[in-house]
Image: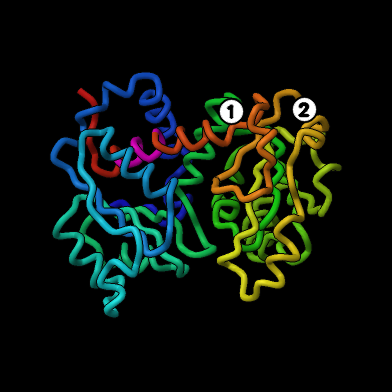
Amino acid sequence: MKHLISPLDLSVEETEEILTLAEDIARDPKKYSHVCDGKKLATLFYEPSTRTRLSFEAAMLNLGGSVLGFASGDNSSAAKGESVADTIRVISCYADIAAMRHPKEGAALVAALHSSIPVINAGDGGHQHPTQTLTDLLTIHSLKGRLDHLTIGLCGDLKFGRTVHSLISALVRYTGIRFVLISPEELRVPAYIRKEVLQKNTIAFTETENLEEAMPELDILYMTRVQKERFFNEEDYIRLKDKYILDTAKMKLAKDDMLVLHPLPRVNEISVEVDKDPRAAYFRQAQFGVYARMALIMKFLEVEAC
C-alpha cells in the first residue's frame, strides 16, 4: 500500500505524473468531478490548520467524494489518551484514505505502519510536509515551465520550517538547482539537511543573513514566517519575528520574472503592498494546492477520469 510520509516516498517519475495530472485538473476540473464518488477522506488534524485541511477537504469534494474527521486533537479520543496507532486502526474502518497532521515528528509514519488505508502526511512537527512540497513544485512548474536550473532563495525560519525541509529534499533531485539560504544564525537550516541532503548530493548553496544582497540572483523567493509555536520561549520569538519583511523596496531589487512563494499563513513577513506585484504568487500557490491534492488522492485511490 502506498503512503506519503516524505516527498522522497515518490520517485521523480511519480512526482511528474502527479504534477501532469494536477495541471490537467487545473485546465478542466469538471472532467474529474465524479472520480471519487462513494470514497471517503478522513482528515486527522491534531494541530490547527486552515489551508492544508480545507484544501484536502476541497480536493476530495471536488472529486465527488466525502470527508470526515477532526480539526483538533482536543476534539478526538487523543484527549482521552488514545494512541495514534489505535486511532488509525479505527479510522481505517471508516474511510478509504487519510490525511494526518500532528505536532510530533514521526507521528504520520507510526500511523502508516498501523493503517490499512493510504496515509498522507499533512505535516509532522518541524519534519516534513510533502503535500505542500507537491503544491510548491506544481506552482513553480506551472508558472516557470520547469523544475531545473533555478536559483531558489529560502528566507526566514529554516530551522523549524518543515515546508523548507521538504522542498529542499525534493528539489535536489533536479539538475542545476542552487539554494540561497537566508536566515538569522539561530534559524539556520538544520545540520542534517545541510550535510545529508545538500552536501551529500553536491548541491550548490550559500548561507546569508542579508535578504537584500540575495534578491538580484533569485528565480524563486520562498518566504516563511517565524513560527511562534515552535519556540520554547517568547523572548527569542519576539527578537526574531521581524527579521525579514519583504516590501516593494526589496522587490525592486529582484528580477522581472522572479516569483515570490509562501506556504502561508503569513504574519508580517510579506507586506500587503507586495500582493499587487504580478510576481507575488502565494495566493495562486494556495489554489494549486487543491489541484495537487486532487491528483494525489486520485493516484493513491487508483481512480481515473472516464
Q: In the rendering, at what x and y percent does residue 123 appear?
A: 45, 57
Judged from the image, the secondary structure of the residue bearing numbered disc 1 is: loop
144 or 123: nearer the eye? Answer: 123
**From what the image shows, is residue 140 above or below residue 233?**
above
Residue at horizontal 76 percent and vertical 55 percent from the top: 243
Magenta-colored span:
291-297
Q: In the rendering, at what x and y percent does residue 45 appear?
A: 36, 59
Question: Residue 230 sits in which quadrant?
Answer: bottom right
Is residue 229 toward the left or the right of residue 11 in the image?
A: right
Q: Nearer the viewer, mark 1 or mark 2?
A: 2
Kind of residue at badge 2: Lys
74 or 258: nearer the eye? Answer: 74
Is residue 184 toward the left or the right of residue 135 in the image?
A: right
Residue at horizontal 27 percent and vertical 68 percent from the top: 76
Distance from the alpha carbon under mark 1 to that under mark 2: 17 Å
Q: Which residue is mark 1?
A: 146
212 or 272: nearer the eye? Answer: 272
Is residue 46 toward the left or the right of residue 298 in the image?
A: right
Q: In the rendering, at what x and y percent does residue 70 appear?
A: 29, 59
Residue at horizontal 61 percent and vertical 46 percent from the top: 172
User: Any magenta on residue 296?
Assistant: yes
Spot the residue most to the bottom. 81
Question: Residue 98 sits in which quadrant?
Answer: bottom left
Is residue 219 toward the left or the right of residue 102 in the image?
A: right
Q: In the rendering, at what x and y percent does residue 1 appear?
A: 26, 53
Q: Which residue is mark 2?
A: 255
Is the C terminus in the top left, top right, bottom left or bottom right quadrant? top left
Classified by dominant secondary structure, the portion drawn in magenta counts as: helix
